[in-house]
Each structure stands twice: as structure tokens, then as C-alpha cells.
Image (spheres, helix red, strand yellow):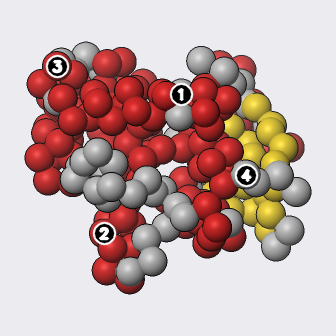
Amino acid sequence: MLTLYFAKGTAALPVHIALEEAGADYDLRQLDFSKNEQTEAAFLDVNPKGRVPALITEKGVLTEAAAILVYIGQTFDAAGLLPADPFELAQAQSFNMYLASTVHVAHAHKQRGARWADDPATIEAMKAKVTQNMTDCAELVETRYLKGPWVMGERYSICDPYLFLMARWLEVDGVDTAAFPGIRAHREMMEARPAVRAVLKYHE
């Protein structure tokens, strides 16, 4: 049995979707970030970073969405979530790591600027830059990464739940999504998937 620690609005969403897509047997533990439950000792014993997702496996705890997605893909290989070709797998990892290292950070500047600065004016300046930064990220994904209809082309993969998370963030961050028809079409396809519908009720 796997156990997923998650919170609404976080990068735990793609992991949750992947678990559902894979038909995994898993349990859920929800944290309320508004109550700072991620800073409580009980959770810090699970993940000292105080962040989600965190996945408890029989071998130990895994953190970081991109890493957990690969674990799910390899553990439940019958679900076909990972490209079989080594180069295509590296491409998938490149995409997910871009979302993790660049897009997620750009998004986080809106609500979590205190991670990078103490000066209130600096934090406000970072917030003001979020819409443009996220628009730039969406432009790169739309024109260079998204092969269509899925991220890797005709085949659904571990990249698609992650892009779905980004697409949900774009509107929150004030991005004009009409400028990105590929991302919008991808989001609509994701929302039609049974696994996604089953998961979203926990993340709304």
C-alpha cells in the first residue's frame, strides 16, 4: 500500500493522477497548508522539507513530483506511462524537470515570495512579474515542448498530469490562456479522463 501526502493547489496533483491512472493501491493523507500542517512534527518526520507530494512506499519515502512520477511509471509499467525509448524518456524527464525547476518557481513567487526575499517591496515586485514569467513559460511549452495531442505526441505519459497542473496555474496567475490553444486543448482532454475526474474532487 502506498500513501500519498497532498495539499490542494500543489504539485501533488500530477502524482495523484498518475497513481489513479496506474491503478495503484494507495491511501491519501491531506494537509491543510492554511493551518501550516506541513510544518508540524508529524509531517516533518515524513518529509523534512515540509512540502508535498510525499509518497510512502514499502522501501521508504519519496519526494519531488518529477521523481515520484518516474517511480510510478516504472512500478506500474503495464499502465504505459513511461516512454520505452531511452531518448524519449530523457525528453519526458527534461519536460517535467523544466516544470519543476522553472515553471513551479515562477508560480511560487506569487504566494511564497518570502522564500526568496524579506523586503516587502521586493516580494511585491516578484508578484508583479508572475504573469509575464508564466506567460513566457507557457509560450515555450506551447511552441517547443507540446507535440500534441499529448506532450510526447500520440501517447499519454507522466508529462501530461504535470502539464495539467501548469495549465490550472496559468489562469490563477493571470495568463491569457486564449493565446495557447494547444495547452487549452490538452487541459480539456485531461479533464475528460476518468482518472482525472476521480482525483479532482480532492483538489478543488
For marks 3 and 1 on the same chain, the one whose residue lies earlier in the sequence: 1
Q: Secondary structure at mark 1?
A: loop
Q: Which residue is mark 3?
A: 178
Find the distance from the CA under tag 3 to the CA under tag 1. Answer: 22 Å
Residue depth check, mark 1 versus mark 2: number of the one nearer the observer: 2
For marks 2 and 4 on the same chain, the one whose residue lies earlier in the sequence: 4
**Amino acid type shown at disc 4:** Gly
Find the distance from the CA under tag 4 to the CA under tag 1. Answer: 23 Å
Q: Quadrant of residue 70?
A: bottom right
Q: Which residue is rendered at x = 82% and y = 52% of the image?
A: 25
Find the distance from the CA under tag 4 to the CA under tag 3. Answer: 34 Å
Q: Secondary structure at mark 4?
A: loop
Q: Which residue is mark 4?
A: 23
Q: Which residue is rendered at x = 33% and y = 55% of the image?
A: 154
Q: Which residue is rendered at x = 73% and y = 43% of the image?
A: 5
Q: Which residue is mark 2?
A: 91
Residue depth check, mark 4 versus mark 3: number of the one nearer the observer: 4
**Amino acid type shown at disc 1:** Gly
User: Marks 3 and 2: in contact by CB < 8 Å?
Assistant: no
